[in-house]
């Protein structure tokens, strides 16, 4: 009986290929959930999503954030998302592609956001992550830093921190580090 089903399945596959249709790729549970998350996105007006590899590759996409308040006002920050086939049981890998002077984002683009690490739960979704990233720009957190220099300046001298952010976003040096323009 089992062999009969395999034979029928193989015949159907051969028939589809003969009709000139490409074989239908079966979606993983992660792809199905991601498709649902993306279709239900409710992004702030200052955020947008794009698919550099085309809409067929949902597991890899970019989110652009343009803060409309705070010291990062006027900046444009691009984040890449790599989603695992076992999503939502594993958080997406998120990297900031824009070099930014920020206490919670290091110079390699690694992002310190609790819901991407120890606080990730399968009930969270892409929308939650995007709002979390947006929140990092409106409320940078010096208590859990990846860029310890930026965190120390934010904690000890907020006016100097704001000046450093403006200089970095305009395209300039902060200390020995050059930041390309992102305004």
Image (cartoon, grey):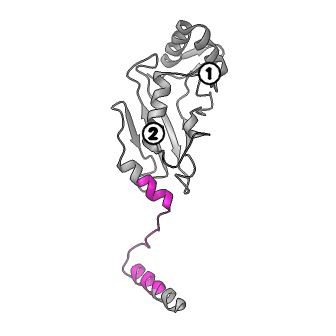
Residue beneath the point at 45% across and 46% down = 52
Classify mark 1: residues with Cα within 10 Å, few (<14), some (14-19) or many (20+). Answer: few
Classify mark 2: residues with Cα within 10 Å, few (<14), some (14-19) or many (20+). Answer: some
Residue beneath the point at 63% across and 24% down = 145
Residue beneath the point at 56% across and 22% down = 141
| Quadrant position of residue 157 | top right
Frontmost residue, 44 versus 75: 44
Where disc 1 sits, the SS reads loop
Where disc 2 sits, the SS reads helix
Report if residue 121 lies within the magenta region: no
Q: Mark 1 or 2 closer to N-term?
A: 2
Where residue 113 appears, as percent x and y from the top left, is 56, 33
Marks 1 and 2 sit apart, C-alpha to C-alpha, by: 21 Å
Relative vertical location of residue 176 with respect to residue 126 in this rendering, above or below? above
Which residue bears the numbered disc 2? Answer: 128
Frontmost residue, 148 versus 95: 148
Report if residue 15 lies within the magenta region: yes
Where residue 47 appears, as percent x and y from the top left, is 38, 34
Where residue 60 appears, as percent x and y from the top left, is 50, 49
Q: Is residue 24 left or right of residue 142?
A: left
- Report the magenta residues as a range: 9-35
Where residue 77 appears, as percent x and y from the top left, is 47, 29
Residue beneath the point at 35% across and 50% down = 39
Q: In which quadrant is the C terminus drawn?
A: top left
Relative vertical location of residue 4 with respect to residue 93 in this rendering, above or below? below
Which residue bears the numbered disc 1? Answer: 143
Relative vertical location of residue 69 with respect to residue 91 in this rendering, above or below? above
């Amino acid at each position: 009986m089992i062999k009969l089903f395999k034979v029928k399945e193989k015949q159907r596959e051969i028939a589809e290929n003969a009709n000139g249709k490409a074989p239908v790729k079966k979606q993983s549970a992660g792809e199905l959930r991601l498709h649902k998350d993306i279709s239900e996105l409710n992004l702030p007006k200052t955020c947008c999503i794009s698919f550099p590899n085309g809409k067929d590759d949902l597991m890899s996409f970019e989110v652009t954030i343009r803060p409309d308040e705070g010291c990062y006002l006027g900046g444009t920050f691009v984040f890449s998302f790599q989603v695992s086939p076992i999503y939502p049981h594993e958080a997406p890998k998120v990297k900031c592609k824009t070099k930014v002077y920020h206490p919670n984002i290091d110079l390699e683009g690694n992002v310190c956001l609790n819901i991407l690490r120890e606080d990730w739960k399968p009930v969270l979704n892409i929308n939650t992550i995007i709002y979390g990233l947006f929140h990092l720009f409106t409320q940078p957190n010096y208590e859990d830093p990846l860029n310890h220099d930026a965190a120390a300046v934010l904690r000890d001298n907020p006016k100097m921190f704001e000046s450093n952010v403006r200089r970095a976003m305009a395209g300039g040096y902060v200390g020995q580090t050059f930041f390309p323009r992102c305004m």
